[in-house]
Amino acid sequence: MIILVVNAGSSSLKYQLINMDDESVIAKGNCDRIGIDGHISHKTSDGRKFEADCSFPTHTEAFEKLVETLTTGDTAVIKSMDEISAVGHRIVQGAEVFDKTTIVTDEVIQKIDDLKELAPVHNHAHALALWACKKVIPENVPQVVVFDTAFHQTMPPKAYMFGLPYNDYEDLHVRKYGFHGTSHRFVTAALADALGKDIKDLKIVSCHLGNGSSITAVQGGKSIDTSMGFTPLDGVVMGTRTGSVDPSAVTFVADKHGFTPAQMSEYMNKKSGFLGVSGISSDNRDITEAAAHGDKKSKLVTDMLVYEIKKYIGSYAAAMNGLDAVLFTGGIGENAYDVRAAVCSDMEFFGIKLDEKANDGLRGKLQRISAADSKVEVWVVPTNEELLIARDTLALISK
């Protein structure tokens, strides 16, 4: 059985074709610069590559090129789209409307689009991609949507409510939603398997660290709290995002700069974080290199990130009344062993003791990095959101 997994952005369409018999990736690629000038990059599992500039006025043309690339030419991997059993889509924001994986209908697409105010960069693009996919993919091929926010719908009100008037929750749906749920669900389940334990018996702090980062408390396989909030801006300092900021600081800075709300949002989402503090880059690799050469602002960025992660681990251990494991995933979590080492240093009070030899140089590999006598296990767990979307899709259409 073959499933196409799609992750659509406002100007991009990333995809993977997965053989569910052995969960191998047959081909993957990205239709980029949609609405600008258009470009596709495509790679098959046996190493064949295709790259070209294209005309992508909308997501429909991108889907048409995707289908053409998968089925024709030197990089074809299937004869027709009839060989695909289903399409699984990643959706960022499902709010309280969607708490589980769902079959796509016209009504579902409209509801996803209706939530665009809660995720303006993502949800309208998701809806456009879904409409485009319906035009291009055969009608007999079912489509499924998997929501990043669904995993966090198990949070209790005390964790997701803000101290705003209750009417703002009832009327405007303002609350903590959390994100990266697909990743957190995948890696915590993978860790439970690696430990040989039932996830229902575990208390885990999952650290998804990348250009966007979130920390989640997972108790018994369920999210009980997470660092990202109403939007993915909240939480720890990120590539171009501020993370948590005193709201009065936001209004103060906006007033001094003469920013509109939209300009202030862009300032906090795209010009802050690693980039804003360091003045150098939003990429942690650049920050690490600059810090190693004595750049004080770059070192400050790393110190801020590490300190904030430590605070979340401590607070979530308190919230769960214990801690069995901490895991690191995402681009930074899986590869930046110096960040992992700094986070785990001086954490003996929580029962965390790092095996420095196991951690040093480890990149993108499932492995325990805590010492044998560490009361809390620490692991690196590579994430695979596309595979989880494919698994969810298969499970739903199999019903």
Image (cartoon, rainbow, N blue to C red):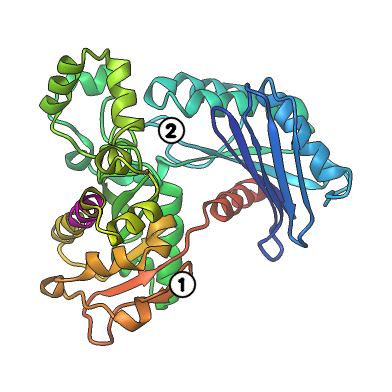
Residue 289: x %, y % from top left: 35, 58
Q: Position of residue 365 (x, y in %)?
A: 48, 71
On whether residue 376 falls in the magenta region, the answer is no
Which residue position holds label 1? 366
Looking at the picture, tell me which residue is in the foreground, 86 or 357: 357
Q: What x and y, as percent, mark residue 399? A: 63, 48
Residue at screen point 20% across, 55% down: 303
- At which x and y percent is residue 292? 29, 62
Q: Which residue is mark 2?
A: 94
Magenta residue span: 300-309
Front-lying residue, 301 or 223 = 301
**Up/down of 385 relative to 71, above or below:** below
The answer to whether mark 2 and mark 1 are in CB contact below 8 A is no
Q: Residues within 10 Å of mark 1 (few under 14, many from 20)?
A: some
State the SS at label 2.
loop
Indicate the amino acid at tag 2.
Answer: Gly
Q: Amino acid at mark 1?
A: Leu
Q: Main secondary structure of the magenta part?
A: helix
Residue that appears at 61% across and 51% down: 390
Q: Secondary structure at mark 1?
A: loop
Image quadrant for the N terminus? bottom right
Mark 1 or mark 2, which is nearer the start of the sequence?
2
Residue 268 bears which disc, if any?
Answer: none
User: Vertically, is 59 above or below 199?
Assistant: above
